[in-house]
Image (cartoon, rainbow, N blue to C red):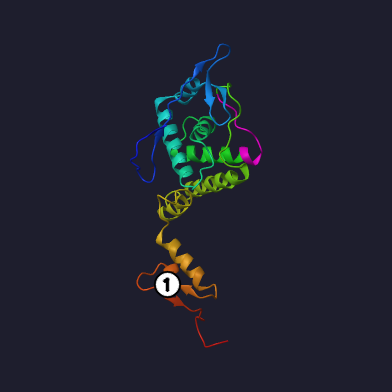
């Protein structure tokens, strides 16, 4: 594994250099699996050809959608999906003519539906075994459903910048801040809880203090 040792936006890209052997029978290559101490069949050249299929415009949109999906996935302390599986989902679920929002929704929605129906993701080249998640499906499934619903929410509120931003902040919480109104609503929720709350929790600067619960009118009950 080659590292660049220069993180950008908390991401440090790496490149794997793998020794592979041509298969005597069947397509693809034998790729070493160091965890299982065995060789497994794969066809990375076919994968590249599949992901480079389609018109130039469609390929460009698909690449952008894949990059967005990877950024979403890497926000988690432990990503649940491999970069390759995200690329395969983009290849499977996106259709020509889709823009980036529709393409990203198609990826998340298609993947969420697949996991919810307990279906596997096959190797698009038909050489290796079904693709595996990095975490148990019951942990990845709600992540995908939340992302799919948030993209749908953003698309349904096109033209309302505040609502779109609030929806996208649910997906890319490390990159997009929710609108100020979202923070105000959260503060109001704290204040109505009838429990003491700190000024820091309300987003107030200065010396931290605890605000006791009070009634909006009248004296003690």
Above or below 28: residue 105: below
In-front residue for pair 44/121? 44
Q: Measuring from the top left, give residue 168's x and y in whole percent.
A: 45, 50
Q: Is residue 121 within the magenta segment?
A: yes
Q: Residue furthest left?
A: 6
Q: Measuring from the top left, give residue 119's x and y in whole percent.
A: 65, 35
Above or below 186: residue 151: above
Q: Measuring from the top left, give residue 155's x and y in whole percent.
A: 48, 46
What crowding class fits label 1: few (fewer than 14 Cα within 10 Å), some (14-19), or many (20 or more)? some
Residue in view at x 47 percent, y 20 percent: 45
Tell me where the magenta segment starts and ends, as one range.
114-124
Q: Main secondary structure of the magenta part?
A: loop
Q: Measuring from the top left, give residue 205's x and y in whole percent.
A: 36, 69
Left or right: 108, with 159 as reference point:
right
Q: For residue 99, say whether it is visible.
A: no
Residue in view at x 58 percent, y 14 percent: 26
Residue carrying label 1: 199
């Amino acid at each position: 594994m080659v590292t660049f040792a220069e993180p950008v936006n908390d991401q440090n890209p790496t490149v794997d250099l793998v020794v592979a052997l041509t298969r005597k029978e069947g397509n693809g290559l034998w790729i070493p699996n160091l965890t299982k101490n065995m060789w497994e069949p794969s066809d990375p050249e076919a994968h590249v050809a599949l992901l480079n299929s389609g018109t130039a415009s469609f390929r460009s949109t698909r690449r952008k959608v894949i990059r967005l999906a990877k950024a979403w996935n890497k926000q988690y302390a432990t990503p649940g999906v491999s970069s390759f599986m995200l690329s395969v989902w983009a290849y499977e679920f996106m259709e020509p003519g889709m823009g980036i929002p529709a393409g990203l929704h198609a990826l998340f929605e298609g993947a969420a539906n697949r996991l919810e129906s307990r279906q596997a993701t096959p190797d698009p080249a038909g050489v290796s075994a079904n693709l595996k998640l990095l975490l148990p499906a019951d942990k990845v499934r709600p992540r995908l459903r939340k992302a799919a619903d948030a993209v749908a929410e953003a698309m349904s509120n096109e033209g309302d910048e505040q609502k779109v931003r609030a929806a996208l902040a649910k997906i890319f919480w490390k990159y997009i801040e929710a609108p100020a109104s979202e923070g105000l609503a959260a503060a109001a929720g704290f204040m109505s809880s009838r429990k003491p709350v700190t000024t820091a929790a309300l987003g107030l600067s200065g010396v931290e203090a605890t605000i006791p619960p009070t009634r909006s009118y009248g004296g003690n009950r």
